[in-house]
Image (cartoon, helix red, strand yellow):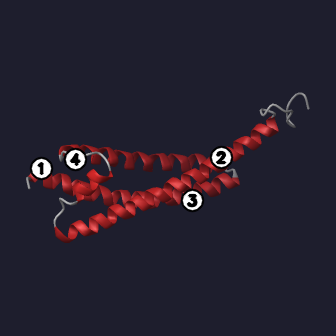
Amino acid sequence: MSEKRARLLQLIEADIRLDRADYLYLRAALLELHDQLMARDSEAISRGNRRIEELVASVRERAERRTKVLQAFGLHIDRAGMQRLLEHFPGAGREALQRDWQQLGEQVEECRLLNERNGRLLAMHHEILGQLLGEQGGHGVYSPAY
């Protein structure tokens, strides 16, 4: 294997481990955001959203880098391509990395579900405010017609 390919594989390995750590932080931030949304603490929500945006930017950057590595190896940019890339890793390191990749996928799915839950809560808040302000076609408590 060429030195360039070996460096790219090391980069992928490091990025997967960084993603695993960042998704743990993202999970915690999404759980905290839910509590902040429940408490309607706008300042804490704003801080939480900034932290989430930073984490998402970091994992997105690494995902884009993985895409470039897959292209450099001539592999498809999909799940199968990533599995083929992981097969390039030597020996026992391959098995550990494949487990990390699988666990990363589970973390991503958990964060996606937490984000959807937060989105539903936010939509519910918006709907309630809309009803109070009369934006739903009726007359709300705070509308001039009331």
Q: As shown in the figure, which amino acid type bears the numbered disc 4?
A: Leu
**Residue 134 appears in which quarter of the rendering?**
top right
Depth order, front residue of 125/52: 125
Q: Give the Cα distance between marks 3 and 2.
A: 14 Å
Crowding at label 3, few (<14), some or many (≥20) Cα neighbours within 10 Å? some
Q: Give the Cα distance between marks 2 and 4.
A: 40 Å
**Residue 122's spot in the image, x, y percent?**
65, 46
| Element assignment for label 4 | loop
Q: Quadrant of the N terminus?
A: bottom left
Q: As shown in the figure, which amino acid type bears the numbered disc 1?
A: Lys
In this figure, which residue is indicated by the disc labeled 2?
Answer: 122
Taking the image as shown, residue 13 lies to the left or right of residue 55, namely left
In this figure, which residue is indicated by the disc labeled 1?
Answer: 4
Disc with the residue nearer the chain's start (4 vs 3): 3
Disc with the residue nearer the chain's start (4 vs 1): 1
Q: Give the Cα distance between marks 4 and 3.
A: 36 Å
Q: Give the Cα distance between marks 4 and 1.
A: 16 Å
Residue at x-position 87% and y-position 37%: 141
Q: Give the Cα distance between marks 1 and 3.
A: 40 Å
In this figure, which residue is indicated by the disc labeled 4?
Answer: 75
Taking the image as shown, residue 24 lies to the left or right of residue 41, namely left
**Residue 39's spot in the image, x, y percent?**
69, 55
Q: Quadrant of the C terminus?
A: top right
| Element assignment for label 3 | helix
**Residue farthest along the bottom direction in this orientation:** 92
